[in-house]
Amino acid sequence: MALFRHGVRVADDWTFPAEGEAFPDSGPVALPRARLIAEWTALEARNAPLGVVIASGEKLDGLEAILPRLSLVKLVIPRYADGRLYSIARLLRDRYSFAGEIRASGDVLRDQVALLVRAGVDTFDVAHEGTARAIETGGIVAVTHHYQPASNDAAEAHAAPGARPWLRRTPVPFPLA
């Protein structure tokens, strides 16, 4: 898959050990939610970045106290039609003030990129080649006027003073976080 951070293709420096596989002593490691919670007491003293992998259908329950220590939350999107992880991204940014990287991984289509960015995602690990090409070439087209604030409300401006003070405008070209 192609990994994009702020619209630029980058190498992935994170390790994602398989179930039951030992993780390295050094370097960034992200574990599935259940394993991270189960092994947290041993991981808490680790002096390297930690992350969690959230599968579609999982919740943030049990991670509340751990989130401030995490550097990455990887949201695994199994099918483009599954939008449950948009809510998780939004909760991470708005309710839990998560400042680390939120990565959308899997079946992400180009039409979803702008919405995921507005929900708080800042990194994309996409399987769809057309989406990867669109991100790389700046071909992501987004709706620029919104009635609800984005998680990164500072990136948007209020459209115009007057009749609709709640209307917001995303700058063009669309910023990939």
Image (cartoon, rainbow, N blue to C red):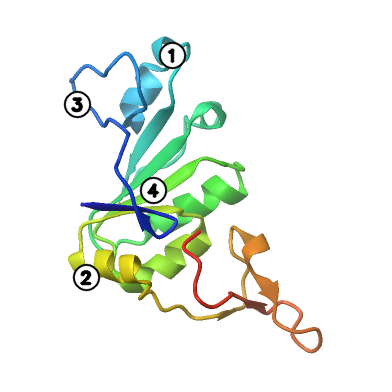
Task: Write down the residue under mark 1.
Answer: 46
CA gap, disc 1 and disc 2? 38 Å
Which tag, 1 or 3, sits closer to the chain's start? 3
Callout 4–callout 2 Cβ contact below 8 Å: no
The reply to whether callout 3 and callout 4 are in contact (CB within 8 Å) is no
Q: Nearer the viewer, residue 174 or 40?
A: 174
Residue 163 % position (x, y): 78, 89
Classify mark 3: helix, strand or loop.
loop
Examine the rendered structure and indicate whether residue 15 appears above or below residue 133. Answer: above
Crowd class of label 2 (few under 14; some 14 to 19; many from 20; radius 10 Å): some
The residue under label 2 is 130
Quadrant position of residue 134? bottom left
Q: Secondary structure at mark 1?
A: loop
Q: Nearer the viewer, mark 1 or mark 3?
A: 1
For disc 3, the marked residue is 19
Check disc 3 and give the amino acid type.
Glu
Residue at 35% across, 23% down: 27
Distance between the Cα atoms at labels 1 and 3?
19 Å
Rounded to the nearest angstrom, the CA distance separating label 4 from label 2 is 18 Å
The mark found on residue 122 in the picture is none
- Callout 4 environment at 10 Å: few (<14), some (14 to 19), or many (20+)? many
Cα distance, mark 2 to mark 3? 31 Å
Q: Is residue 28 visible?
A: yes
> Where is residue 167 shown, x and y percent of the image?
68, 79
Q: Residue at x 32, y 13 (%)?
A: 25
N-terminal of the pair, mark 2 or mark 3, is 3
Residue hosting label 4:
103
